[in-house]
Amino acid sequence: MATTLDYIEYVCEQISDVGEIRYRKMFGEYMVYVNNKPVITVCDNTCFVKLLDAIAPMMTEAEKGYPYDGAKECYILDIDDADFAKGVIRELEKVTPLPKPRKKKSQ
């Protein structure tokens, strides 16, 4: 089951005041960016965040899972608890680097 547009808009609404929020469809699912940093992978209407030390103390009760076949294990973020999700996202945004610019293909 692919992520619905309604769900991705709900996710963005839940974390709306943590920075500049945008999403991008990737491989049939979505990546949510905060201040141009990729912080949430959304697959099958489920939010996944990386297993990082910066959020480990906050995520001790969180379930873990795999967003897609071949992916690394991630925490499953409870996006319904907006205050909790915003706290996690704020910490992730601090430690997530900006993506490296892609090199243009030569013709």
Image (spheres, grey):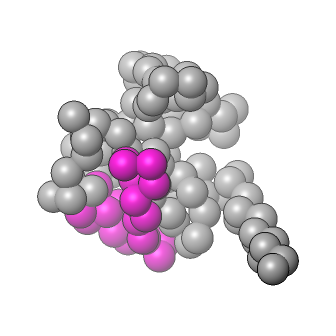
Quadrant location, the N terminus = top left
Q: Is residue 74 above or below residue 44?
A: above
Quadrant location, the C terminus = bottom right
| Residue placed furthest toward the front | 107
* Magenta segment: 9-31
Nearest the viewer among 107 and 94 is 107
- Magenta highlight on residue 5: no
Q: Position of residue 86 (x, y in %)?
A: 41, 54
Q: Position of residue 90 (x, y in %)?
A: 53, 56
- Magenta highlight on residue 22: yes
Q: Position of residue 45 (x, y in %)?
A: 25, 40
In the drawing, does residue 15 fall left or right of residue 55?
left
In the drawing, does residue 44 fall left or right of residue 23?
left
| Residue placed furthest toward the left | 6
Q: Position of residue 6 (x, y in %)?
A: 15, 58
Nearest the viewer among 48 and 102 is 102
At horizontal 44% and vertical 48% (from top left) the residue drawn is 27
Residue 80 seen in this snapshot: yes
At horizontal 23% and vertical 63% (from top left) the residue drawn is 9
Image quadrant in which you'd find residue 53: top right
In the drawing, does residue 57 fall left or right of residue 9?
right
At horizontal 25% and vertical 41% (from top left) the residue drawn is 2
Tell how many labels. 0
At horizontal 58% and vertical 70% (from top left) the residue drawn is 36
| Residue placed furthest toward the bottom | 107
Image quadrant in which you'd find residue 11: bottom left
Residue 86 seen in this snapshot: no
In the drawing, does residue 77 fall left or right of residue 81?
right
